[in-house]
Image (cartoon, helix red, strand yellow):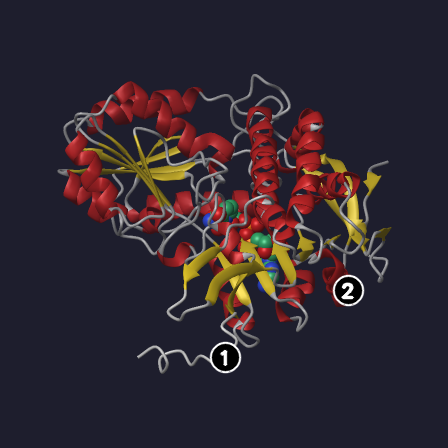
Amino acid sequence: MSKKYQNYINGKWVDAKSGKTFENRNPANWDEVVGTFPLSNKDDVNEAVKAARTAFEEWRLVPAPKRGDILRKVGDLMTERKEQIARLMTQEMGKVLLETRGDVQEGIDTAYYASSEGRRLFGHTVPSELPNKFNMAVRMPIGVAAIITPWNFPMAIPTWKIFPALVCGNTIVFKPASDTPATATALVEILIEAGVPPGVVNIVHGGGSEVGMVLVEHPDVDLISFTGSTGVGKKISEVASKTLKRVSLELGGKNAQIVMDDARLDLALEGVLWGAFGTTGQRCTATSRLIVHEKVYDKFLSMVVDKAQKLHLGDGLDEKNEVGPCVNENQRKTVDSYVQIGKGEGAKVVAGGKVASGNGLSKGWFYEPTVLADVTENMRVAKEEIFGPVLSVIKVRSLDEAIRIANNTTYGLSSSVYTQDINNAYHAIRDLKAGITYINAPTIGAEAHMPFGGVKETGNGHREGGWTVYDFFSEWKTVYVDYSGKLQRAQIDNA
Ligand code: NAD
């Protein structure tokens, strides 16, 4: 019997009002059911939003350092349960243990950062233009935040949103991806144990349209923090604009690693393998394009192909495996359809290119790590997000051409340049249109205390991580205290 999970609303674990449920299966072995979860709808969302709205009135008055203390306990509990959560995550979404441990660690780092932020949340004091008057700007909580998240970082991404939201004094309704509801539940259990009061954190499981969109439309939701595909992000932005809700969107990517002729190829090789095939290529920052200088193209391509073919596929719980399955059947179909599109456009499959078969792979959504060579800049496989283990390789004659091609996509999340030439490096830092640029490191690997996000259709200008996300989850209030004992008219008495 698989475990039965519930929603958590107003301090209680409850089924969906409709009584309906859905199953979550292990993508490395589809016979294994990880759990059954409530298939919720607008009735459940309404209850959760009502609870969050009511709880907000008390939570906003809890001193921020006390809210931060709860997050310190959250960090401690996550540390204790790191291995257990990592295993659960591998079981429900497939990435290998090494990576699911990293995903939980990112959540732990975010918890401790947010905890200490409870003692900062700095405002500004600014001199007044008038005598005997004091000016300051302080951060205020906003209200109810809807947290809508994808399945590829089922712990890190929710924590990037939920922890700053809570420290700033907001309450939340959390709608996790339906491919990773068990990891999301583990996070909520920890928040409860750490002392978050009833109604402050609510989780409602279910589909994007039935739960996610209902939150976006709900008049009592003030903030939407969404990470997912650009298509859904655009819909959310459109709908939320009707009520002028504040919306943070972290969306897709088509990230490129540039390898110059002076690069250390051994380092660039490790970088591209990790960037392209880590998380089975299912990262928003995954290296989806490899742009190589013509002088080293043939040599580097054969190095990549050789290693890609040797990557060990299999169940992520077995530590000898380096690459897990795609998250579900649809994702694998998308990956394969892009490989066919690439072939049709004239790209050459030089590694992989098909559904993986072999021992232990027959009941999972495995796809061979794939390298497409001779890709040119206007092919669809050079411009569109694939979100799977497929690397498109493009030959260039110069750094300028490499940067122009790297920028030739609607996305702008991460980018990377391998070079030993400091002038090349700074040139690329200045000209790559991306929210993140790595020098001599792969396109993946965010640190919790640094801003994270992208330009163009990767988002709408907000950043998660670091100090920047606190601007999204709080509202500036400007305060003037006049202690002159008389009416002072700014711009008039001041002239
Ligand atoms: P998705 O857009 O399909 O789903 C994301 C979340 O939105 C899920 O919880 C889903 O149920 C919900 N959703 C779906 N339709 C909705 C709707 N109409 N209204 C409201 N909510 C809805 O994305 P996914 O397949 O879960 O994740 C993969 C995508 O996420 C990729 O495009 C990837 O690049 C992107 N991503 C971006 C970042 C980033 O920080 N930029 C990080 C990770 C993933």
Q: Position of residue 264 (x, y in %)?
A: 24, 21
Q: Nearer the viewer, mark 1 or mark 2?
A: 1
For label 2, the crowd category at 10 Å Cα-Cα, with few meaning under 14, some 14 to 19 and many 20 or more, is some
Q: Is residue 478 left or right of residue 394?
A: right
On-image quarter of the C terminus: bottom left
Residue 191 numbered tag:
none
Left or right, 82 with reference to 255:
right
Q: Is mark 1 within 8 Å of ligand 1?
A: no
Measured as percent of width and height from the top left, residue 476 is found at 51, 63
Secondary structure category for the residue under label 2? helix
- Left or right for 79, reference 279: right
Residue at numbered disc 1: 486
Q: In the rendered view, tell whether residue 50 sits above or below residue 226.
A: below
In the rendering, at what x and y percent does residue 130 appear? 40, 71
Question: x, y percentage for residue 41?
Answer: 75, 63
Identify which residue, 53 or 96, lies in the foreground.
53
The residue tagged 2 is: 54
Q: Could you tell me which secondary element the residue under label 1 belongs to?
A: loop
Q: What residue do we see at 36% from left, 23% from top?
A: 270
Q: The residue under label 1 is which amino acid type?
A: Lys
- Residue at (52%, 27%) from the top-left corner? 323
Which residue is at the far top? 320
